[in-house]
Image (cartoon, grey):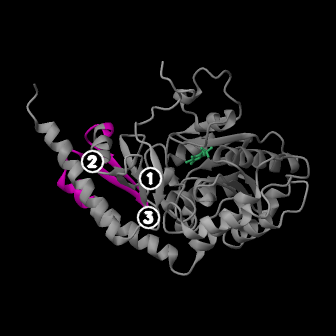
Amino acid sequence: MTSSSLFQTYNRSELTFERGEGVWLIAADGRRYLDCASGIAVCGLGHAHPKLVAALQSQAEKLWHVSNVYQIKEQEDLAQLLTNNSFADRVFFTNSGTEATEGAIKTARRYHYANGDSGRVDIITFEGAFHGRTLAALAAGGQEKYLEGFGPVAGGFKQVPFGDLTALEAAIDENTAAVMLEPIQGESGIKPFKLEQLRQIRQLCDEKGVLLIFDEIQCGIGRTGKLFAHEWAGVTPDVMAIAKGIGGGFPVGAFLATEDVAKAMIAGTHGTTFGGNLLAMAVGKAVLEQILEDGFLEEVQAKGLLLKQKLARLTDLYPQVFEELRGEGLMLGLKCKAPAADVLNAMREEGLLPVPAGENVLRFMPPMTISNDEIDQLIECAEKAAQRVETAQTAPAR
Ligand SMILES: *Cc1c(COP(=O)(O)O)cnc(C)c1O
């Protein structure tokens, strides 16, 4: 048994960090690592961003928390910023992603209930989905390895193969409340839906009277070069879950909906103690204001393209190590040919910190504030890591 007092639910690396500066994480021994994951798409503006630090400090001196039984102007402000820049009319703030997907599911069911169609409870998801770790979110994700040993699987969820619209159409029936999907699946290994598919799914939902929920917890908040990934497809959902990037490292989540849908969630139907906490709202607002500044998202697109081109070149140069590059903007997945764990170790030795995902993929989701120069450094280190892996592969077996 380790001497740790923590639950041993993570296979943690030995690395430990003391400070962050922009895209850099500084380890306890002083070594600087280039953060290629942003705490899994959380610290989109990098570490210790002066505007976020200032927002947190100034709110900390005023007021931290009041109950949601009172008017909270800071919540109103952030909600308005979100609705002004999205399809949504209403926002409910949570602390985490999984609470946001739970809230989205509840909202979709309640909408049909309010319309006298209380039989519509089923949520249809796609294989590979990840929507969080609460019991309903796990049922939505449908991953056997996460459900095992946790008792009865929450009812009301169905799953169809990834991207299979024929199966989706066949699965929709009079009990279907909503289709829920990540426009770009994150945990399964950076798997984007085709934009045309997103449009077809929207149309199918409209034809069948079914709601569409987008889980943009990982792909949203600027990461793809648009504020929300679904904007690339030119369609909007009825309900959306966000989290991760909106807090820039402070825990914030939210579910958003159109007025027509949100109005089913009348007083008393949902609540939270911490959700919409003032510190969270202050930071969330600072994050969003920064991302919405003129030119910011265009920069993310340009940097995403640059990183993509350079990683694609490595994929061509080291076919024994890498297999395929996929994703959009600064949400990239490098599918490895060599075991991803080996490539990850080599990357860490070279000072890079990508995070693994399904399908033998390493995710590259650096802070959106990464400079072109830092992209060059990233690529230089990634190439050295690839050479390490290649050398180890060709070394004669002993
Ligand atoms: C991370 C994630 C979640 C869960 O968010 P938590 O904050 O860990 O609860 C849900 N959906 C997607 C797409 C995610 O990436």
Label 3, label 1: how many angstroms apart (C-alpha)?
Answer: 13 Å
Camera-nearest label, 2 or 1: 1
Element on which disc 1 rests: loop
Q: What residue type is labelled 1?
A: Ala
Q: Give the residue number, with chain letter if any, for mark 2.
A: 323
Relative side of 289 to 107, left or right: left
Q: Which of marks 2 and 1 is nearer the N terminus?
A: 1
Q: Residue 37 carries which label?
A: 1
Q: Which of marks 3 and 1 is nearer the N terminus?
A: 1
The reply to whether residue 320 is visible in this rendering is no
Q: Residue at x 56, y 51 (%)?
A: 182
Q: Give the residue number, with chain letter if any, for mark 3.
A: 329
Q: Which of marks 3 and 2 is nearer the N terminus?
A: 2
How far across and down, in percent of the image, does residue 74 sit?
Answer: 78, 66
Dot 2 and dot 1 residues touching (CB under 8 Å): no
- Quick check: is the Cβ at mark 3 less than 8 Å away from ligand 1? no
Label 2, label 1: how many angstroms apart (C-alpha)?
Answer: 20 Å
Tell me if residue 278 is in the magenta stretch. Answer: no
